[in-house]
Image (spheres, grey):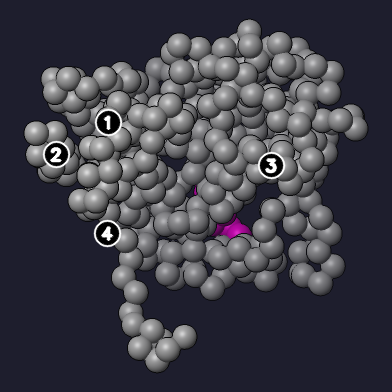
């Protein structure tokens, strides 16, 4: 590395033209809390009791969001870790030498990582025309070696909510555990009439990420469960720490995520998050109508995500103009109405799109 490179001061990504990310700017209180607790380690709670207490409070707060009165769990690095841990716990608690996990094709790619790391067979069923899990298709893939059935509450591509109660029944009829991935949807769905949480179905574990719509600083995810045995199934001995065991996937964890999640939840639940959801839905509906008026095919937004069938040449031109966009597996451009997305941003996006379409 040369001297000028050593002296250069890197600048963070601006969110000014970020439209497809499920990350957003943390609120100021969450940013400040992250800085204050940056060097603490909730992975060693006896040495760092202050951040350990904050983590317990965050788990309680997240339990309120998902209608779980006595939640167990911990603050993860994000949805990927939480999903891997849910698969790992289900595998460890099951009585089979050939475990498999079953879910819809719309599950997050972290389940592919989990299957690879944990040597578990991942079976994915096709989704229906409504982009949600097909319960019958999932049922056909379940057998006596199924350790976990997965449903998604707020899919990454379309924001759809799978039929969670029906999938829970499929899981438990097969003596398997049931996991819900609500990494993005967990801070959106409390303000809807969707059936998705612990109060709606017999859910064993859930993923929920404060660093997405929760507006905490990265990394701040969450793994929640009804049963202490899930955490016991994940725990390993830690003989050289003050704490006897550790259930998290990572060892040393910065307290930044824990403290930031605590601050974000304290400041924003419930009114701030309700406002984010309502504002996001207003923008999603407005953008969907604007794109349809221009002759583009749009997947109807049920929640604050809009998927648009945009020609490749226009997509590339818009990315060349600095718009940060990504596509679904089917090729649509997805626009996620995160809290940093404004009407003015979308109007600028449409202005550039109109110019490129001429």
Q: CA distance from mark 4 to mark 3?
A: 32 Å
Q: CA distance from mark 1 to mark 3?
A: 34 Å
Residue beneath disc 2: 356
For image coordinates 71% across by 11% down, the residue present is 140
On screen, residue 3 versus residue 125, left or right, reads left
Which residue is the site of mark 4? 14
Q: Secondary structure at mark 4?
A: loop
Q: Which residue is mark 1?
A: 311
First-in-chain label (2 vs 4): 4
Q: Do the numbered discs 2 and 4 sit on residues whose CB atoms are within 8 Å?
A: no
Mark 4 vs mark 1, foreground winner is 1
| Earlier sequence position, callout 2 versus callout 1 | 1
- Label 2, label 1: how many angstroms apart (C-alpha)? 11 Å
Which label sits in the foreground, 3 or 2? 2
Question: Residue 315 at x, y = what percent?
Answer: 27, 39
Element on which disc 2 rests: helix
Vertically, is 196 above or below 344? above
Q: Secondary structure at mark 1?
A: loop
Magenta segment's dominant SS is helix
Residue 114, which numbered label?
3
| Within-10-Å neighbours for mark 1: few <14, some 14–19, many 20+ | few
State which quadrant residue 326 falls in.
top left
Q: Nearer the viewer, residue 6 or 251?
A: 6
**Residue that appears at 47% across and 85% down:** 1
Q: Is residue 308 left or right of residue 223?
A: left
Q: CA distance from mark 2 to mark 4?
A: 23 Å
Q: For the magenta stretch, what is the residue range?
A: 52-59
């Amino acid at each position: 590395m040369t001297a000028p490179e050593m002296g250069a001061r890197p600048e963070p990504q601006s969110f000014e033209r970020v439209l497809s990310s499920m990350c957003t700017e943390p609120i100021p209180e969450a940013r400040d809390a992250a800085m204050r607790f940056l060097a603490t380690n909730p992975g060693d709670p006896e040495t760092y009791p202050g951040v350990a207490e904050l983590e317990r409070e965050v788990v309680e707060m997240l339990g309120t969001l998902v209608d779980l009165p006595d939640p167990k769990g911990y603050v993860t690095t994000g949805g990927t870790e939480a999903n891997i841990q849910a698969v790992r716990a289900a595998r460890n608690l099951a009585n089979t030498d050939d475990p498999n996990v079953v879910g819809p094709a719309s599950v997050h790619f972290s389940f592919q990582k989990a299957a690879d790391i944990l040597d578990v067979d991942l079976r994915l069923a096709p989704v229906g025309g409504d982009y949600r899990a097909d319960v019958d298709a999932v049922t056909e893939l379940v057998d006596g070696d199924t350790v976990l059935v997965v449903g998604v509450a707020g899919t990454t591509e379309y924001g759809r909510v799978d039929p969670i109660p029906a999938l829970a029944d499929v899981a438990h009829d097969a003596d398997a555990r049931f996991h819900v991935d609500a990494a993005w949807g967990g801070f959106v769905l409390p303000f809807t009439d969707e059936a998705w949480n612990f109060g709606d179905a017999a859910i064993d574990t859930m993923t929920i990420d404060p660093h997405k719509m929760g507006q905490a600083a990265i990394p701040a995810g969450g793994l929640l469960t009804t049963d202490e045995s899930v955490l016991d199934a994940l725990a390993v001995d830690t003989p050289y720490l003050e704490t006897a065991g550790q259930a998290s996937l990572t060892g040393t964890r910065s307290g930044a995520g824990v403290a930031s999640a605590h601050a974000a939840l304290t400041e924003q639940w419930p009114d701030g998050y309700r406002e984010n959801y309502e504002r996001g839905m207003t923008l999603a509906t407005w953008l969907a109508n604007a794109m349809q008026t221009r002759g583009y095919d749009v997947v109807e937004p049920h929640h604050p995500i809009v998927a648009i069938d945009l020609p490749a040449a226009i997509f590339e031109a818009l990315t060349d103009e600095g718009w940060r966009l990504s596509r679904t597996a089917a090729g649509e451009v997805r626009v996620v109405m995160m809290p940093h997305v404004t009407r003015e941003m979308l109007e600028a996006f449409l202005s550039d799109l109109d110019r490129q379409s001429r």
